[in-house]
Amino acid sequence: MLGVLAGRVTALAALVAALAVISAAPASAASAAAQPAHGTIGLSVPDAFLVGGQLVTVPGRTVHVEGVVRPYVPGQTVLVKAFVGSKEFKRERLSIKPAAGGRYGTFTASVSSPSAGRVTVQVGHKRTATLGGLLERRSFAALDERVGFGARGPFMELVQQRLVALHFYIPQTGVYDTGTGLALDAYHRLLHWGTYQSLDGRTISYLLDGFGEFKVRFPSHGRHAEGNLSLQLIALVDGSHVLSIYPTSSGKPSTPTILGDFRVYSKVPGYLPDGMYYSNFFHTGYAIHGYSPAPDYPASHGCMRVPIVDAISIFNWLKMGDWVDVYY
């Protein structure tokens, strides 16, 4: 009798436990459903520059910090803070906008550092009922632009990188040297700004924004050189693609450079008795050659002079029979 009673008690206990589990299940599911989504923030700075593996820009230049939030939850915002060193200079709340398909959201913050230093952008999202708390940071350097001849470092590497991107011939030494000065002079000529080798704010701004293009006039001539005498520039060109741009000093008014389309018919390395250096002759005694001086105005006896440091690179690139097109 006692055994039967014990069995019934055990069965009743099991039934009560089962009912408790069943009744608790909906509450547990509801609790899980109420939990905010676990999200992530990714940040990028697409219009900063990469120098030595580090993101860089300059003070006063606006860069955009683009963010991606996963998942997208309607109505959510992020708080963007920007610091140079430990000093906060920007605070802005931005809405998260849905991307195509609504699987993630995006936002874009505009940041312009007021001074040189390490810039840190911090983006935060407070925990809500639908999206968890998030925090992400991205840093880059705002480089000091106050440089002169002999300066070296990341800013000079950036300047030389940008000159190369615009096809100006320049050995990338990381130093504000003679090659940098000549390339800057050629850049100013291209922009019709005169002839000078210094780095002012306008030059830096135009360089970083990628302004300046040598207009090729003879793409059908394949590998060729174009001498634009109105700009006092020589460009080495392959079809329509500009490879290198150099400053030149063409013929003075009393001995002007011949105009027209010619071909390289003789190449003479080294120095000639009159001081011509690594000469590419394209018509009788007319040549592209190195010479000292090669001033920033027409001064030759008819040839297109280039600085001594530029002559060998031009000589090595031009081949016998290549076109040389000379015009204003």
Image: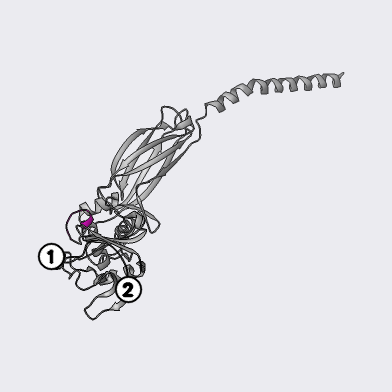
Residue identifier under label 1: 253
Task: Report the front residue among 55 and 304.
Answer: 304
Figure label count:
2
Q: Residue at x 31, y 36 (%)?
A: 92
Residue 298 image position (x, y, % from top left): 16, 65
Task: Report the front residue among 246 and 3.
Answer: 246
Residue 48 image position (x, y, % from top left): 34, 49
Gap in angstroms between the C-alphas marked 2 and 1 = 26 Å
The magenta region covers 189-195
79 part of magenta stretch: no
Q: Residues within 10 Å of mark 2 (few under 14, many from 20)?
A: some
The reply, left or right, for residue 298 in relation to residue 153 is left
Q: Compared with residue 200, is residue 26 higher up or lower down, i.e. above or below?
A: above
Q: Compared with residue 25, is residue 120 higher up or lower down, i.e. above or below?
A: below
Residue identifier under label 2: 267
| Element type at mark 2 | strand
Quadrant of image for the C terminus = bottom left
Task: Report the front residue among 14 and 198.
Answer: 198
Q: Residue at x 23, y 55 (%)?
A: 190
Q: Amino acid at mark 2?
A: Lys
| Element type at mark 1 | loop
Q: Residue at x 30, y 43 (%)?
A: 111
Q: Amino acid at mark 1?
A: Pro
Is residue 260 in view from this perspective? Answer: yes
Task: Report the front residue among 317 and 203.
Answer: 317
Say whether marks 2 and 1 touch (CB < 8 Å).
no
Residue 196 image position (x, y, % from top left): 18, 61
Most frequent secondary structure within the magenta stretch? loop
